[in-house]
Amino acid sequence: MAVKKTTRKDESLKKQCNNVIKKLEVQLQKKRTTIANIAAYLAVSIARAPKRVKSAPPKKVTASSRHYFTVPTQLFYPDKNNPKGYRDAGVSMADYLKKIKGGYRATGAGSYMKEKVQTRVKGSHPPGTYAEKNQRPGEFFVKGTGKISETERRRLQEYQEQERRLHAQLLAPDRRKNAKDQARMQAKLRKIQERKAAITSMSEKRKARFLQQEAKARSDFQARVESRRQKRLERIKKFREEKVLYRIVKTTRREVADPQAATVLRKGAEPGKVPFSWPRSGKGNYYISQWSDGVSENGKTRWVSNYQVRQVGDWSYQVSIQPLGGRTSYALRRLEYGGDRTSTPYVIGYLVNTRDVKGGHRRVSFSPVYSDSKTVRVEPRPWVSPTVAKVQEYVRKRNGKDIRLS
């Protein structure tokens, strides 16, 4: 079979075809790149759509605060007979903190250098081993002793002296009023004895009557003395309540050293409006679909976005927001479409435990009391669908109508 000879014209035509194909491939690659960029742009737009609240709660939250509101906290007393183990004291924490004058923490009155070898591993074998991450042999830090200051110690000494004088003054057995009452009682008893002596013959009934009169004179005297003693004890108690120094202590991890007069809660966006996005502390500091991952070399926060851009075909990409972890797995979907959820408990007050110690000290410790969880209805606060519509309009203006978002 004869081989067809390639002419110059054929070579030129082939070259032209290859050039056209290359140009088409360049155009196709540009389209693919454009679509990929649009997918990434859509993902970032959705991640940044919620209104970010960057400010921390102000020191004083008022009714006009835009993003925060407060719920007053209450004081609770331990009560074993109550199913919850406590009962409402009928006093707000604000009033109680005023009564104890805020209390004080005995810190800074003494310190010593402690080596950074600490935090025993719970349940470790053999006992006495320590967590490796806390081993810093040769490194020391200043640790407070928790002792009271010299100023507070002087105040306690003054109080002790005042209380001792008040005790001696009010509870002395030979108080003037008690002595007068005792003299009256003895005079009554002498009269009764004189009447008894004047009677030569006495029946059993009359003897019992005289004994009853003598017992009544003695009991009246004891009642007056005891009533006066109780009043004086009330005066001492009132003095102690006015002068006692409240020291806030934290004996367990659950207890808090700084009880608050009100719990600060966040205001949500209005139903139908774009939701607010709140920062959190530590690694969980995210804005709905972003969280911080430390600080870069230039001192700026590194942000990781919780969205995915996945190519599912030559000309199509799938954009999705990753669910947040833990209890908030479906929080993003619930914000978009609404739904029921279990409310998160918040601090409604504090359970107080008190213990009087020698010398005018009253130690108080506070454990937070949380509200009960309940099912609440979350109204839709769409933020994804409006963002997609805006991006679609932007894409149409920039790239024409030949690129479709679904």
Image: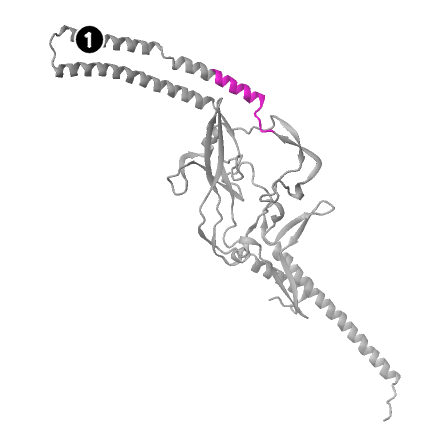
Q: Residue at x 26, y 17 (%)?
A: 219
Q: Residue at x 61, y 57 (%)?
A: 46
Nearer to us in this view, 14 or 110: 110
User: Would you say the magenta stretch is mainly helix, strand or loop?
Assistant: helix
| x and y percentages locating residue 179 in the rendered image | 32, 9
**In this picture, residue 173 sits left or right of residue 341:** left
**In this picture, residue 231 sits left or right of residue 351:** left
Secondary structure of residue under mark 1: helix
- Magenta region: which residues? 145-161
User: Coloring scheme of the render?
Assistant: one colour
Q: Quadrant of residue 209?
A: top left
Q: Quadrant of residue 399?
A: bottom right
**Magenta stretch: residue 158 in it?**
yes
Q: Residue furthest front?
A: 126
Badge 1 is on which residue?
Answer: 193
Q: Is residue 222 visible?
A: yes
Q: Residue furthest bottom?
A: 1
| x and y percentages locating residue 262 in the rendered image | 49, 38
